[in-house]
Image (tube, rainbow, N blue to C red):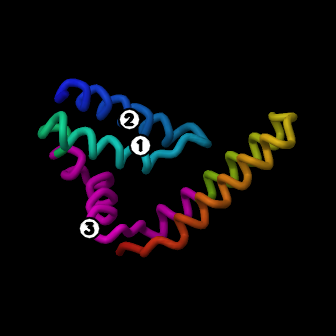
Amino acid sequence: MRIVCLVFAYLFLALALIGIFLPGLPTVPFLLLTAWFASRGSERLHKWLYDHPHIGKLLIDWETKKAISRSSKLVAVLMLIISWMIMYHTLSNLWLLWVIGMFFILMSLYLVTRCESD
């Protein structure tokens, strides 16, 4: 089971890193999944995540206070808007655009209603 968790931890870490550069692919949920699987698969990876100067604070704030920084909220909502605009110009299926738009609005509402960390 430890090996399976380790594989998933690295898979979700790779997806989180790709999500930094690819609009539409969320970063934070994949980092949270990485931390969860790393805690069960690799003490070393788990420690590295929590000791990381940027990722660690995000994970600790979420774990202890369910809080997200204002700047993270802003970046996330802006990326959702940009992603939807790109899809608007590339997709021809209006129904799909509407569904994605509603999903992005719900995600944005969830983010902005979370507590803010320092």
Residue wearing tag 1: 30
**x and y, in percent, of residue 8 in the image:** 32, 30
Residue range in magenta is: 47-76
Question: Dot 2 surroundings within 10 Å: few (below 14), some, or many (20 or more)?
Answer: many
Q: Is residue 68 magenta?
A: yes
Secondary structure predominantly adopted by residues drawn in magenta: helix
Question: Dot 1 surroundings within 10 Å: few (below 14), some, or many (20 or more)?
Answer: many
Which residue is nearer to you in this view: 10 or 57?
A: 10
Q: Are the residues at dot 3 and dot 1 in contact (C-beta closer than 8 Å)?
A: no
Instruction: Determine the residue positioned at 43% across, 48% down.
Output: 29
Q: Splitting the image into 4 quarters, where does residue 14 fall?
A: top left
Q: Splitting the image into 4 quarters, where does residue 38 fall?
A: top left
Q: Quadrant of the N terminus?
A: top left
Mark 1 or mark 3, which is nearer the start of the sequence? 1
Mark 2: which amino acid? Phe
Residue wearing tag 3: 64
Q: CA distance from mark 2 to mark 3?
A: 21 Å
Instruction: Determine the residue positioned at 44% across, 34% down.
Output: 15
Q: Secondary structure at mark 2?
A: helix
Taking the view exactly as shown, the residue that stands out farthest to the left is 43
Mark 1: which amino acid? Phe
Q: Are the residues at dot 2 and dot 1 in contact (C-beta closer than 8 Å)?
A: yes
**x and y, in percent, of residue 16 in the image:** 43, 39
Q: Are the residues at dot 2 and dot 3 in contact (C-beta closer than 8 Å)?
A: no
**x and y, in percent, of residue 52 in the image:** 24, 50
Mark 3: which amino acid? Thr
In the drawing, what numbered circle is on residue 12?
A: 2
Instruction: Determine the residue positioned at 31% across, 71% down.
Output: 65
Q: Is residue 8 above or below residue 31?
A: above
Which residue is nearer to you in this view: 11 or 5?
A: 5
Which residue is nearer to you in this view: 92 or 3?
A: 3
